[in-house]
Image (spheres, coloured by chain):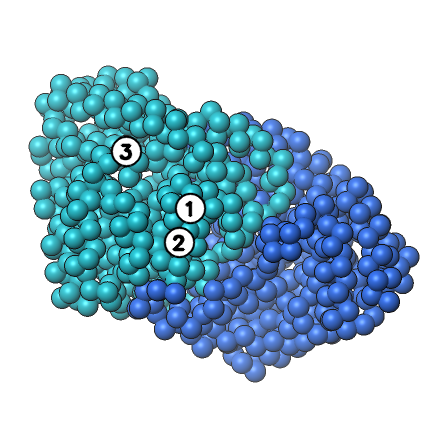
Chain colours: A cyan, B blue
Amino acid sequence: MSAFSRFTSLAASLPSSVPFVGPEAIERNRKLAVKARIGANESGFGPAPSVLEAIRQAATETWMYADPENFELREALAIHHGISRDNIAIGNGVDGLLGEIVRLVVEPGTPVVTSLGGYPTFNYHVKGFGGRLETTPYLDDHENLDGLLDLVKKENAPLVYFANPDNPMGSWWDASEVLTFAKALPDTCLLVLDEAYCETAPESAVPSVRAIIGMPNVLRMRTFSKAYGLAGARVGYAIGTLGNAQAFDKIRNHFGMPRVSVAAAMAALKDQAYLRDVVKRIANARERISTIARQNGLSPLPSATNFVAIDCHKDATYAKSIVDGLMDHGVFIRMPGVEPLNRCIRVSAAPDDKLDLFADALPKVLKALG
Amino acid sequence: MSAFSRFTSLAASLPSSVPFVGPEAIERNRKLAVKARIGANESGFGPAPSVLEAIRQAATETWMYADPENFELREALAIHHGISRDNIAIGNGVDGLLGEIVRLVVEPGTPVVTSLGGYPTFNYHVKGFGGRLETTPYLDDHENLDGLLDLVKKENAPLVYFANPDNPMGSWWDASEVLTFAKALPDTCLLVLDEAYCETAPESAVPSVRAIIGMPNVLRMRTFSKAYGLAGARVGYAIGTLGNAQAFDKIRNHFGMPRVSVAAAMAALKDQAYLRDVVKRIANARERISTIARQNGLSPLPSATNFVAIDCHKDATYAKSIVDGLMDHGVFIRMPGVEPLNRCIRVSAAPDDKLDLFADALPKVLKALG
């Protein structure tokens, strides 16, 4: 290995790992080509044509660093949400922002609460800063709000993660329940409310921005990676109090935002007509995925996201065989990582030509599995 | 402020600061427009036309996350340098990589050695992880290699930063001296050899990649931000032993690279003819900046970078007045931050129309200052 001999004891103890294996690695390792990329909850519908044009226009500006204050993007988001730009912090997607939040709160040994089977990248960051993960199981495929609250209190945890709508199950809570949970938390615990999928959720599932904006122990995470179709641009933002938004300025890579990505996010935010249209197409795709599942004797779960979790009615080994079998046909999907969620597979919304491949391959795979 | 009450004591102690104020912030704060952006060592010559085309082509792929293993870019870089792709780690520019290296090595109180007046973003990261900066002054506007070595030994420091060529002074050491320094360091000290400006340096100033590749206490930093003209893309890479390159995988944001940026870097690397051409144009621009300086009674320092430090023969107040005065004319430049370097101003290489503005404004500013 010939690594440097004096990395911190924490760094030395960490594995070189990745929260998710990318489809490109699967292609290389299995010598297969992905024909339907419907596993990473990207949006195969893509960003708006106006966004593609903005990227092309911004290409000639790529020689310049982006504004380290992200002033214009924060201003546009502030107007969009009816808040102040000082309530907003920009980062390299929710993943990047999660790393920064964890760094602000977690030291070696700090207890951190999340759901058993929740977002692996959050867990990756917690471990990366030496935190101690404390988890509570899902309840009926929903994150268990009472369980999370109890665990926060029991562990006196300063950080809790909750995604609404949820990934990987697609389930959600109503806004009133989210608010009740946020307000029940001790003010010594910071709630990371991951709303990466909020654009595809029923309106009733998303608390108004103003309802939480004054709470110093809540940070809401939003992204351009999902409904806006810009996963590859790496633009996310956190909404919180002035003090919390400014806390990112203590540690973030100020010149870290790609200039073209910022231009893309600005254009995407402006084109709300496209967003409304694509949200409908995502809803239709969820319906189609559900129909395909039912036609094959499987049970789709209700979803407020851009994917559908499908109950395959057996164990993780069986679900894994379906994931692997579909890949033999060039159909890349994923599945939850822990019991009992891992009886399911997870399929991302996509245009019909991609779902055709899924519809075609699934019965063949199931038949081969017997 | 209404910030969360339980940030770590380290986080609570950090200021919300930025290593550099961006030109956009200066424009907003002073209500002035930047007409010549020649202060941030970006490349006004821009990336190659082939790179702009690659960005435009990649726009339609922005809905996908980039390959978290950065396989193709590492492979292309490996071939370019004649090493293995396992010797390479990709990150969000040198700035992002520096943050990761500091995180791997620095805990609260860890001594870290650098030059007094060296790259502020490195210092920002060291403070951000609670490290204790130990500095040695420049010697005749060069980083003092003997001074750095002595300080490493005296402090038993596990990390030392050295830029060759240097920013902000533009000075450099020959490859043999760099090698002697690297080999003289105790193997308990990791050398961060920042070579952001190596493409514009004399060949004799850059040790061969193979000369250092086996040393577990050296990491070399390269970037597409300078000569390649892609500051806004945020693509840098570290070259080191297998074990050191893989150490980044313990903590990095695996899905953090922007897809369009990776495509841009691939295209830039491919177009070495453009790089050779732009390096000549940068050299010519350095000459022109030096001539303008001399015509105004100032003294340009020799430079191996894409900028020129200019000795204004007085104190920091005077140099600051020149920086501010030039901005009144829409000419954005910067200056070193500490004595005795801050008797200088720093002007980035740029196309002639931008240097025309500098040539026009400088005598007016100097005259007004008397």
Whole-number angstrom distance, CA of label 3 to CA of label 2: 23 Å
Q: Decide if residue A48 is in sight here.
A: yes
Residue for point 75% across, 65% down: B321
Residue type at mark 2: give it: Asn
Judging from the image, what secondary structure is the residue with disc 2 in? helix
Whole-number angstrom distance, CA of label 2 to CA of label 1: 8 Å
> Mark 2 or mark 3, which is nearer the start of the sequence?
2
Q: Decide if residue B82 is in sight here.
A: no
Residue B208, image x, y percentages: 66, 54
> Mark 3 or mark 1, which is nearer the start of the sequence?
1
Check whether the beta carbons of the residues at disc 2 and disc 1 lie within 8 A of each other.
yes
Q: Which mark is residue A87?
A: 2
Residue type at mark 3: give it: Thr
Vertical placement of A94 versus B148: above or below?
Answer: above
Q: Quadrant of the C terminus of chain A?
A: top left
Residue for point 54% across, 52% down: A68
Name the chain letter of the residue that bears numbered label 2: A
- Which residue corresponds to mark 1? A78
Report the side of A213 relative to B119 (left or right). Answer: left
Q: Which mark is residue A200?
A: 3
Name the chain letter of the residue that bears numbered label 1: A
Mark 2 nearby-residue class (10 Å; few <14, some 14–19, many ≥20): many
Check whether the beta carbons of the residues at disc 1 and disc 3 lie within 8 A of each other.
no
Residue type at mark 1: give it: Ala
Residue for point 39% across, 26% down: A274
